[in-house]
Amino acid sequence: NAFFQVTLKTCQIRPTSYALRHYVSWDKEALRNWRLEGKKGSSSPSGKGEEWMVLSEHTNDEALNAKGSEAIWPLETKEFFDSFRVVQVGMNSNMHYFLACSGIELYGQVKLSKAAAEMMAAAPSGNRSPETEQQ
């Protein structure tokens, strides 16, 4: 069960969709069987947080099929998370247990931590984007 993980330190995301990108070197070794999981509280002082929650599960998914290929999948959750991980749960397109992925993108609603929100509020107004001010 190879995996990679992203932990956000200053915000949480309620994801509405996500994208993965296959690496650009070869058409081989593309993900076919994996889970996207989310976790709350990973950026707390203890770093432990809650248990991982399965957000999306894929079995023999052939969306990633060529070098550099990208695909987007919708998600349905009302929860905010500060850690995300992709866990390989079966063989890839080359029948190996080798996790080859060169990118992940998360889309959804962002909620800043209290410290990050205070820092944004203290910044000169020319340094804030309208999108950040609305969050």
Image (cartoon, grey):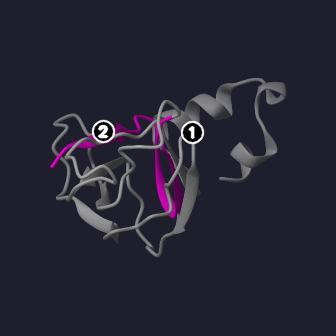
Amino acid type shown at disc 1: Ala
Q: Which of 90 and 94 is in front in this view?
A: 94
Query: Residue at coordinates 53% horizontally, 41% vertically from top-left?
Result: 67
Q: Position of residue 4 (x, y in %)?
A: 29, 40
Q: Which of 4 and 76 is in front in this view?
A: 4
Q: Position of residue 128 (x, y in %)?
A: 76, 33
Query: Residue at coordinates 75% horizontally, 48% vertically from top-left?
Result: 131
Query: Residue at coordinates 36% horizontally, 53% vertically from top-left?
Result: 31
Q: Is mark 1 on a helix, strand or loop?
A: helix
Query: Residue at coordinates 26% horizontally, 40% vertically from top-left?
Result: 44
Q: Where is residue 103 in the image (x, y as percent from the top left)?
A: 49, 39
Residue wearing tag 1: 117
Q: What element carries label 2?
A: loop
Question: Is 99 placed above or below 57 here?
Answer: above
**Which quadrant holds residue 53?**
bottom left
77 left or right of 38? right
* Residue 43 - label: 2
Q: Where is residue 106 in the image (x, y as percent from the top left)?
A: 53, 51
Q: Is the magenta stretch mostly helix, strand or loop?
A: strand
104 left or right of 119? left
Q: Is residue 99 magenta?
A: no
Q: How far apart are marks 1 and 2 (CA)?
A: 16 Å
| Foreground: disc 1 or disc 2 | 2
* Residue 59 - label: none
From this viewpoint, is residue 109 visible? Answer: no
Q: Nearer the viewer, residue 78 or 19?
A: 19
65 left or right of 42? right
Tell me which segment is drawn in magenta: 1-23
From this viewpoint, is residue 24 visible? Answer: yes
Q: Does the magenta stretch include residue 22?
A: yes
- Callout 2 crowding tier (Cα within 10 Å): few <14, some 14–19, many ≥20: some
Amino acid type shown at disc 2: Ser
